[in-house]
Amino acid sequence: MISEFNKICVVGLGYIGLPTASLLATKGFAVHGVDISSKIVEIINAGKIHIVEPDLDVLVKSAVQSGRLKASMDPVPADVFILAVPTPFKDDHVPDISYVEAATRSIAPCLSPGNLVILESTCPVGTTEKVAGWIQELRPDLRIPNLSPMVIGSGTDFQLFIAHCPERVLPGQILKELVENDRIVGGINEPSTEVAKGFYKQFVSGTVLITDSRTAELAKLVENTYRDVNIAFANELSLICEGLKIDVWKLIEFANHHPRVNILKPGPGVGGHCIAVDPWFIVDALPEEAKLIRTAREINDAKPDFVVKKVKENAARFKAPTIACLGLAYKANVDDLRESPSVEIVRQLAALHLGDIWAVEPHIEKLPSTLALCNVHLVPLMDALKKADIIVGLVDHAVFREIDPCELAGKIVIDTRGMWHL
Ligand SMILES: NC(=O)c1ccc[n+]([C@@H]2O[C@H](COP(=O)([O-])OP(=O)(O)OC[C@H]3O[C@@H](n4cnc5c(N)ncnc54)[C@H](O)[C@@H]3O)[C@@H](O)[C@H]2O)c1
């Protein structure tokens, strides 16, 4: 199983890095995980996990107990370095690659000739080449492949292999998809691509497709943008249907009977660390050209305001209603609240002082501080179903889908996910 690459250093132990590190450890590699959070390092070294992902607890425990997964705050010399750090955007939707730069700078002193450096973080086009540039700046002793577009893919006088391999796993199914998904590997030159492909072939059962780093970077951005644009279409339809007093769920169901139509489901907005973020990396690169992409982003970003307005209109029928918001995560059956439109909706509702705002989120134990500070209460589902005047369905967690519509009788229900077919 193991080739000449025995030791792997994974930088960033979050939703992507930790499953990757523990999977590699259970495949027989010696894995050193790195995170800037001492708490995360401590939890992992205790064989525990700090995120919710099915079966990850068992995998990490076994990886740590076997001695093949260790974590610390500092990188160590290894054969392969995998960077899986965040790539958010700044307030003005400009990509923030400072985490990638910091992670690259942290591994630079540990690099030796023959190493493979893989950037797995989703990133703007050209970032993998920047990684090569930062390494070259810090390690003039190492010969890095020539980055001139004219010579990419040629020449043999270099000592490092550098590639991008975007991650495309679905939270909730990460461990299965890490192995089974097809992967796109793009090196900054052909040897880097080939070496990185060989590495992934050792643990990926899906097809490993090869290209250059820029195409690999854009492919990942485009995959998420495709989803965003199609969700924006569904969200726009939901507004049109509201105006025309037509049931959007039935409309979509009927339209999807057309053999070549597959309209996605509308929702309260688009959240998460990927779909709500990555399209901006394309808009930032070419704002004049990316008109549809920007509009889709704006439509999806405006959807929470529409939901808030609808709740406000209904709340006006009561003196001080109890409003229960079902779901805070950015999508069904996960605990991840990042960029979640539901959190934003609940925050805005609390700021309006319409009545008591309750949140039901079975996947978390504590409210994020943004909500706790504005007097939102985290309550069990049963309490919400018994006592709330208004139920706002925000996330289609399985446990919410199972609610018997009889339990909602007599309440005002605003179902942004089409869960209950009322
Ligand atoms: N979460 C997903 O489902 C998903 C899917 C595909 C791609 N991605 C991409 O993968 C990348 C990582 O995402 P994630 O969800 O794992 O993020 P995350 O926030 O869950 O984890 C990132 C980790 O990196 C650590 N970190 C930050 N800077 C560091 C540094 N300089 N050195 C060491 N550790 C550092 C953080 O403390 C954190 O624990 C992002 O680019 C994201 O867009 C994520």
Image: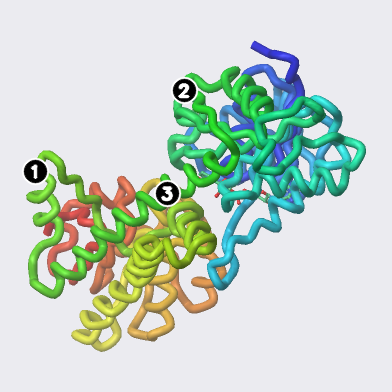
Give the residue type that dot 3 points to.
Asn
The reply to whether residue 76 is in sight is yes
- Could you say where residue 224 lies in the image, as x and y percent from the top left? 42, 49
Mark closer to the chain start, 3 or 1:
3
- Relative to 409, residue 311 above or below: below
**Residue found 20% across the figure and 50% down from its top:** 263
Q: Residue beneath label 1, please?
A: 257
Task: Give the Cα distance between marks 3 and 1.
Answer: 25 Å
Quick check: 246 left or right of 28? left
Callout 3: few (<14), some (14-19), or many (20+) C-alpha neighbours within 10 Å?
A: some
Mark 3 CB within 8 Å of ligand 1: no
Q: What is the secondary structure assignment of the residue under circle 2?
A: loop
- Could you say where residue 241 lies in the image, as x and y percent from the top left? 13, 67
Image quarter hosting the C terminus: bottom left
**Residue found 83% across the figure and 42% down from its top:** 108
Mark closer to the chain start, 3 or 2:
2
The reply to whether residue 61 is in sight is no
Q: Which label sits on residue 207? A: 2
Q: What is the secondary structure assignment of the residue under circle 1?
A: loop
Q: Which label sits on residue 224? A: 3
Residue contact at pointers 2 and 1, CB within 8 angstroms: no
- Could you say where residue 261 lies in the image, as x and y percent from the top left? 16, 45
- Relative to 387, residue 81 above or below: above
Quick check: 350 left or right of 146? left
